[in-house]
Image (cartoon, coloured by chain):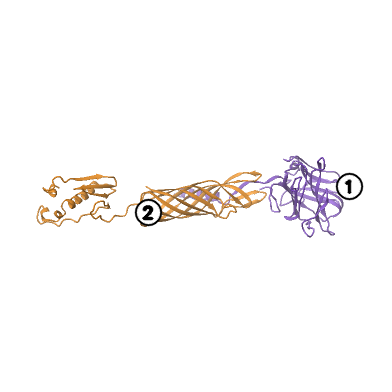
Amino acid sequence: MARLRGPSKPNASIQIEDLGATFRISVLNKVREYREEARECAYRAKVAALFAALIIDPTALVSAGLCERPPCAPPPEPVPPAQVEAKAEAPAPPPAPPSQPLVRLELSPTLMTGLGAKELAAHWGGVLRIALGRGPVVPVLGAAALWPANTSVGDVRLRQWRLPLDLGIRATLPSSWIDLYGEVGLAFALLSERARDLATAKTQTGIELGGRVSLGARLARRAGLAPFISLQAEFLPDPPRVFALPEGAAGRTPYVWMGACVGASWGM
Amino acid sequence: MRTRATNTLLALSGLLALGCGQDLDVGSDVLWASRFEGGNFAEWSSVPFGFGNSSATAPNAIAVSNEQTHMGSSYAAKMTVSGTATNTQGIGASLVQNGGLPTQAYYSAWYYLPQSVTVGYYWVIMKFRAALGNPPTQAELFDVNFTNPSAGVMSLRVYDHRNGDLPLSVPQPPEVPVSTWFQLEAFYRDASDSTGRFTLWLNGVQILDWQGATGLTSWVAWDVVSVGEALFPEPAILYVDDCAVSRTRVGPTGLLAK
């Protein structure tokens, strides 16, 4: 290093600052920040030395004077760091693709409605979804808490409450600015119905079981918060029947539930 | 491993069974019903409205019977009247809901007439009573009667004790089937002004819709009866089953029990 500095630059110093997933190198008022998430000291020292050599005396790297012993081997090609964020004037090497987060949490308000009812029930509520894994296809689990809503089955007017759960897989198609994903899986729900205006009203709770598909889009940020939007449909082959006297079997609760979410996705 | 797979399959089967076509019984609009399935008339004595009773004065008779029943039930009420040639006092067989009924409700009963009967004077099968007169006293208001528009044909007429027969809202007298259960359902709204209403359906077909003042107080009585005069042949038998007072129409397909 002293030889690189030479007599004209006796106070040239090299500073390396650890910033976590990145590190900053300062040499002769030249500063550059590099991303290196593995935090390997040896690798960082090598990059710092190369950067310092380029800043202090780029020609020294290729001059014969650098050789300790003849025959002199050609100087090694500088190895670009894996991930670079350039802040200095020097051209930065191209960035390598970052890794996907291991866990993705999604929280959003939602609107769900069952199709086919005389009086369409609009359930507002919140949804929490968890996707686990880094691959393009990962398992996903979701749960929603929905506010009760009014609906009707046949001529029976009802107050309806629903607690849906689902378990499935998510396949993601990443791109430079937006990630598209689709989900398929099983849907379960607790469904509670209470007659609104029968002379003798009872609350009854049943279980729905069926399939679920969903499509979504998310801003392509590898970690931290990113907005997303998704649409989903649940298909129930044999939904509960609503029974009331004297009407008898008034009909079934919806065969198809549709929902929409707009919220925040947090990659960790 | 096999046990785990079996358990998983059992758990999935259980889940599927739970999630398949459950019945959610959310309640009832039927305020009171009598299906005679206890083999007695207890449903007519412990009524939630006022009081009720079943009665018949000899030679007339009322009994729970399994000879003819509606919709596969076990019992029905059998009303037998005879001696009607001299029945000037209107004595017969009666099931009575005496007072305390809602100011508006649907009243339904199923009847079975084993044979055609010639009605010489009248044959009442359903009756509404209300508070009439000044001062108001409990009195007969509307009678639903069997009648014969032609020989051997059974039909209905509605008699208002204040003004005589009410015109039906159908062009031809509705034919009452013989040897087949038929439903008679009425909507009665008790009001001392023009909002009062009396509507009648025979097997789900509306045959009368009358509006006007009915009772002067909220007192309402409903009778399912067999009271006649000059009936031939005798005894005249009428079966009754599945009677109900309901906030909504029962209709021909309605149920009184799950």
- Provide the residue designation for mark 2: A220
- Provide the residue designation for mark 1: B88
- Which chain wears purple? B
Q: Residue at x 25, y 55 (%)?
A: A93
Name the subunit of mark 1.
Answer: B
The image shows residue B128 at horizontal and vertical percentages of 78, 46
Q: In the picture, residue B182 is in which quadrant? A: bottom right
Q: Amino acid at mark 1?
A: Thr
Q: How many marks?
A: 2
Q: Is residue B48 left or right of residue B8?
A: right
Q: Is residue B125 left or right of residue B11?
A: right
> Dot 2: what SS?
loop
Q: Which mark is residue B103?
A: none
Q: Residue at x 51, y 51 (%)?
A: A112
Q: Is residue B241 left or right of residue A73?
A: right
Q: Amino acid at mark 2?
A: Ala
The image shows residue A218 at horizontal and vertical percentages of 41, 53
The answer to whether the residue labelled 2 contacts the one labelled 1, judged by CB atoms less than 8 Å apart, is no
The image shows residue A262 at horizontal and vertical percentages of 45, 51
